[in-house]
Amino acid sequence: MLEEEREIGEKGQIVIPKPFRKAIGIAPGTRVRIELRGNEIVIEKQKMDVVKVFEEIARNGKSIRKFDADKSYDEHMEERWKRIKKST
């Protein structure tokens, strides 16, 4: 069991110690849920909603181009590079 004491900063902030972050996979940008349970504050890592992520990509992502199996990899990369150069 991990256990540490920390001091609350002026703005009510606290740093989650590295062993705790590492144990449950929290990194910068990770979404967490904070819940008050009686006298305890519980911080839980949020599970990724894969469907929501793909919906967001579908709404805002670039269109996907079909890959022509008859062309070589180099031909595909050359075409992609030409499209990039045109757009800049």
Image (spheres, rainbow, N blue to C red):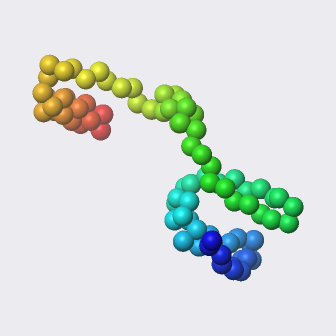
Name the quadrant of the C terminus.
top left
The image quadrant of residue 24 is bottom right
Instruction: Name the spot of residue 10 as percent of width and height, x first.
Output: 74, 77
Instruction: Using the image as rendered, state which of residue 41 and residue 88 is in the foreground.
Output: 41
Q: How many marks?
A: 0
Res 29 visible: yes
Residue drawn at the location 71% of the way across and 77% of the way down: 9
Instruction: Using the image as rendered, state which of residue 48 and residue 71 is in the foreground.
Output: 48
Residue drawn at the location 45% of the way across and 32% of the way down: 61
Residue drawn at the location 74% of the way across and 60% of the way down: 42
Residue drawn at the location 77% of the way across and 63% of the way down: 41
Q: Residue 64 vs residue 45: left or right?
A: left
Q: Residue 40 vs residue 16: left or right?
A: right
Residue most toward the right?
38
Figure check: 20 above or below 29: below
Res 56 visible: no
Residue most toward the front?
1
Instruction: Name the spot of residue 58 as percent of width and height, x first.
Output: 48, 28
Name the quadrant of the N terminus.
bottom right
Q: Residue 28 vs residue 85: left or right?
A: right
Figure check: 20 above or below 51: below
Instruction: Name the spot of residue 55 as percent of width and height, x first.
Output: 54, 29
The image quadrant of residue 49 is top right
Instruction: Name the spot of residue 15 as percent of width and height, x first.
Output: 63, 72
Figure check: 15 above or below 54: below
